[in-house]
Amino acid sequence: MSLDAQMKELANRSKAAARQLTGLDTEQKNRCLHAMAQALCENKAAISKANEQDLETARGMGLSQAMIDRLVLNEARINAMAQGLREVAALPDPIGRILEERERPNGLLLQKITTPIGVVVIIYESRPNVTADAAGLCFKSGNATILRGGKEAIHSNQIIAELMVQAAKACEPHFPADAIQVVPTTDRAAIPALLCLTDEVDLCMPRGGEGLIRAVAECSKVPVIKHYKGVCHVYIDGQANAKMAIDIAINAKTQRPGVCNAMETLLVNAAIAEKILPELGEALARHEVEVRGDEVSRKWLTPLIDQGQLSFKLAQEEDWGAEYLDLILALKVVANLEEAMAHINRHGSGHSDAIVTEDPANAERFMRDVDASAVYWNASTRFTDGAEFGMGAEIGISTDKVGARGPMGLDELTSYKWRCFGKGQIR
C-alpha cells in the first residue's frame, strides 16, 4: 500500500471513530480515562524499556542534553502522565454545554452548544508525554486523535497509545479503538500526505521547534493552531524586589531550559542594574548559564567574567530573537519600562512575558501593552502550561490571535453548532 493510501485509510478510521465517540456519555469517558491512567502506572517497566530504545536513538543523533531530557520517561513523568489523565477525568465535560440561548420574535428557539471538532492531528517532537496528554484531552472532548511524534520517540509513543487503547476497550466495549492512533511510519512524507486530507482531518496542532511548526503550517491544507517559538522575557523593573527578581529569573531560565515557556531574554532596568546584576550573575554562574549580554550588563558582571566564574559573550542582534532551549541567556539593561516593552514587542514571539515590580501602575501598563498570550506580574513564565492553569493535561500552546490563544485544554478543543427549535415556522 502506498504512503498516501495508508494515510487515507488511517484518517478514514479516525473519522469513523470520531462519529462513534459522540455516543459515549461523560461517565463512560471518565471511566476510560481512569483505566488509561491505571494502565500507565501498571506498565512502567514496559514503558521504560521502550523509552530506553528511543534514548539510544536520540544519543546517536547527537541531540543536546536539553532535548534528550525532553525525551526521558522516568517514574515521575509516567506518574505525571497518569495524574494528568485523572485530572482530565475530574474536569467538567466540555461537550453539550449551552453557550448561548435566544428566542426570536417568531418563536424560534436557538441554542448555541459545544461540539467536538472531529479528527485532530497532533505533530510533535521528543516529548512522549504529549502522547498521553493529547490523546486524553482529545478523547474527553469527543475528538479522535492521530498522533505523529518524532522518530526519536516512536517506541515510547506507540506503547503509551497501545496501553491507553487496550485499557479503555477493556472497561468500555463501546470505545472505538481507532479513536487514538499513532502514525506507524517515521517517513516525513506522511505529514503532507495526512494534512491534505481535508475531508477527513479537521485540525492540526504541531508542537515542537520553529522549523517543524513552519514546515507543517506551510504544507497543511487543514487548519493549523500553532506557536512558532517561545522567546519569553522577564523584565526586572526599577521598583522590583531584588530577591524576588533573582528567584524568578533563575527559575524561568534554569528549571527546565528546553521548554517553550522558559525565559530566553532578561531585561533589567538601569536603575537597579548595579544592585542586582552582581548577585544575579553569581546565581547564573552556579547554574552554568552562558550569558550573551550588552555592554552595560558586562560592566556590572566584569568581576565574575574576569575570574572565569561566568561565561559571557557580547550579544549580537540575532540573540534578541533567539529561542535557545538551553542554558543560554540574552541579557540587556534598559532605560525604563517603555524601552522594555518596545524590546519585547519587537523581538518576542507572543508566548509569555513577565514583569517583576512593586509598582502596580507599571505592572498594569506592562500587562496591558505587551502583546503576548500570557503576561505575568511577579511570577515565572514557567507557569504557562495547561496543568498549571488548572486545565488538566495540556494539548499545546497557541500564539495565534484567531481562535484559541495561550495554553489549550478541553474547552479549546471544542467547536459549536446551533440547535434550532421550531413549531412550524417558515420564512
Image (cartoon, rainbow, N blue to C red):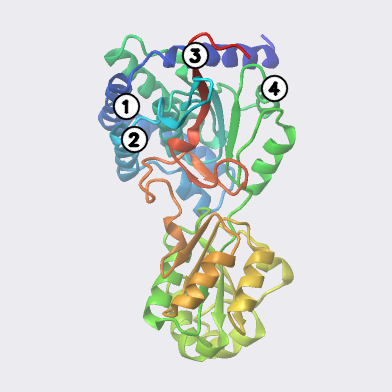
The kind of residue on which mark 1 rests is Leu
User: In the image, 37: left or right of 110?
Assistant: left
The kind of residue on which mark 4 rests is Ala
**Residue 374 image point, x, y percent:** 51, 57
Instruction: Say which residue appears at 51% left-offset and 27% top-offset.
Output: 416
Rendered view: 301 above or below 357: below
CB contact under 8 Å: marks 2 and 3: no
The kind of residue on which mark 2 rests is Val
**In this rendering, does residue 159 appear at all?**
no
Instruction: Say which residue appears at 65% left-offset and 65% top-offset.
Output: 345
- Report the residue marked by disc 2: 88
Circle 1 SS class: helix
- Report the residue marked by disc 4: 193
Report how far apart the C-alphas of labels 2 and 4 lie in the structure.
31 Å
The kind of residue on which mark 3 rests is Gly
CB contact under 8 Å: marks 4 and 1: no
CB contact under 8 Å: marks 1 and 2: yes
- Which of pointers 3 and 4 lies earlier in the amino acid sequence? 4
- Report the residue marked by disc 3: 422
Report how far apart the C-alphas of labels 2 and 3 lie in the structure.
36 Å
Of the 4 image quadrants, the one containing the C terminus is top right
- Which of pointers 1 and 2 lies earlier in the amino acid sequence? 1
Residue 331, quarter of the rendered image: bottom right
- Report the residue marked by disc 1: 33
Q: Could you classify mark 4 by the number of other residues whose Cα lies within 10 Å: few (under 14), some (14-19), or many (20 or more)?
A: some
Report how far apart the C-alphas of labels 3 and 1 lie in the structure.
38 Å
**Residue 324 image point, x, y percent:** 59, 60
- Which of pointers 4 and 1 lies earlier in the amino acid sequence? 1
Residue 13, quarter of the rendered image: top right
